[in-house]
Amino acid sequence: MCKNVGQVYLNERTGEPEWVTVRTGFLGRRQTFVPLAGSHRAGHEIQIPFDREAVHAAPHIDVDGHLSV
């Protein structure tokens, strides 16, 4: 479903990965936030416990966009 991880966000307290962005939308022009809770690694892939609709409904930014406070 999700082809490419964009950014990895770490927990500031533990330093552990907590969120990633994945490229979604037409031609992968959006980065959608996906929590890593409940996910696992399978080779070079990250398996997430969310379906396509949940990922597409999640908060996102344009690939060249910026996060506001």
Image: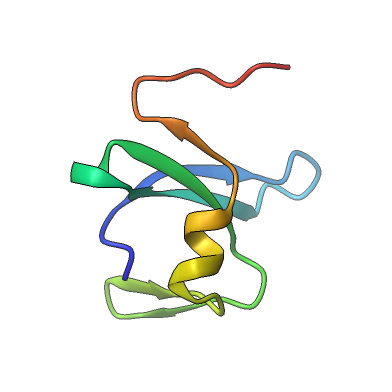
The residue at 63%/44% (across/down) is: 10
The foreground one among 14 and 32 is 32
Asked whether, in this view, residue 48 is left or right of residue 10, the answer is left
Image coords of residue 41 (percent x, y)? 43, 77
The residue at 29%/80% (across/down) is: 43
Which quadrant of the figure has residue 16? bottom right
Image coords of residue 6 (percent x, y)? 36, 43
The residue at 26%/61% (across/down) is: 3
Colouring mode (rainbow / by chain / secondary structure / one colour): rainbow
The foreground one among 7 and 26 is 26
Residue sticking out furthest to the right: 13
Residue sticking out furthest to the left: 27
Asked whether, in this view, residue 29 is left or right of residue 54, the answer is left
Asked if 64 appears above or below 27 in the picture, the reply is: above
Asked whether, in this view, residue 19 is left or right of residue 32, the answer is right
The foreground one among 55 and 37 is 55
The residue at 59%/64% (across/down) is: 36
Image coords of residue 63 (percent x, y)? 35, 29
Quarter of the picture containing the N terminus is bottom left
Asked if 56 appears above or below 7 in the picture, the reply is: below
Quarter of the picture containing the C terminus is top right
Asked if 10 appears above or below 67 in the picture, the reply is: below
